[in-house]
Amino acid sequence: MTLKYKTIGFVFKKSEGAESDQVFSIFTKDFGKLELKAKAIRKITSKLRADIDIFYLSEVEFIQGKNNKTLTDAVKIKKLGIFEKDLENFLIAGKIANVLDIFIRGEEKDEDIFNLLNDILFKLEDDRLKIKNRQLIFQYFFWNFLSLQGYGLEVDNCAACHSKLDPHSVYFSEKEGGIICEKCYAADKKAKKINSDIVKVLRIILKKDWDTLSKLKMESFSRQLLSKVSESAMSAFCPS
């Protein structure tokens, strides 16, 4: 007897398979990351195509074959429809999907990541959020995701010498995997100079204080700098 498994998850990637097949990458509540093959889903007659697609939250049913898992049924719970009319949100969701794809390699249940993802993707649908603060949704996800992956960022003390940080003389070090002081910068000239705004934002993010973060006013320069710091962290922590 073939066993069927059922769970709910967010579809964060899809790719074309042989003939009319597609393969969906889904982060699920019960199994973590799954790769499910949907046979003949691109055919107009497919019963699956209406209930699963990129950035859908769906209940999925699948069977485990010898070499892969095959999707047998899907029920759409929510289609994050704002992505269709908001390119900025679509791009942010794409960045989140890229992080999941890069960092999560195997199948392993992690409800904390699922809950974080659930929280973040629904925040993207909050049209009360100021446009300028939309990118902070990704930052909130990224740094808390890293923390859940075991890459806790030290934001109060120097990651190298552990002394108290002076927020006006701080640097982000890929080598140390965090913020370092001016003294330790002498040993890591590749570290990037940051400012007190970045330190402040990272502290708020890691406290998971979304209410404060969503109302925060940041200069354009600080926003760009925070994005560069995130890119550096991605490079530093990315699994080889």
Image (cartoon, helix red, strand yellow):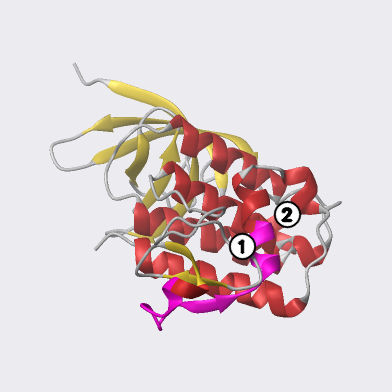
Give the tally of numbered discs: 2
The disc placed on residue 204 is: none
- Looking at the image, which residue is at 36% across and 78% down? 187
Q: Is residue 193 magenta?
A: yes
The disc placed on residue 82 is: 2
- Looking at the image, which residue is at 36% across and 31% down? 109
**Residue 98 image offset from top left, x and y in percent:** 45, 61
| Mark in the foreground, 1 or 2 | 1
Rendered-image quadrant of the C terminus: bottom left
Inspect the image, locate mark 2, and give the three-letter code of the amino acid beneath it.
Answer: Ile
In the image as oriented, which residue stretches furthest toward the bottom?
189
Inspect the image, locate mark 1, and give the three-letter code of the amino acid beneath it.
Answer: Ile
Residue 45 seen in this snapshot: no
* Neighbours of disc 2 within 10 Å: few (<14), some (14-19), many (20+): some
Rendered-image quadrant of the N terminus: top left
User: Which stretch appears magenta?
Assistant: 184-201
Tell me: residue 149, above or below residue 22.
Answer: above
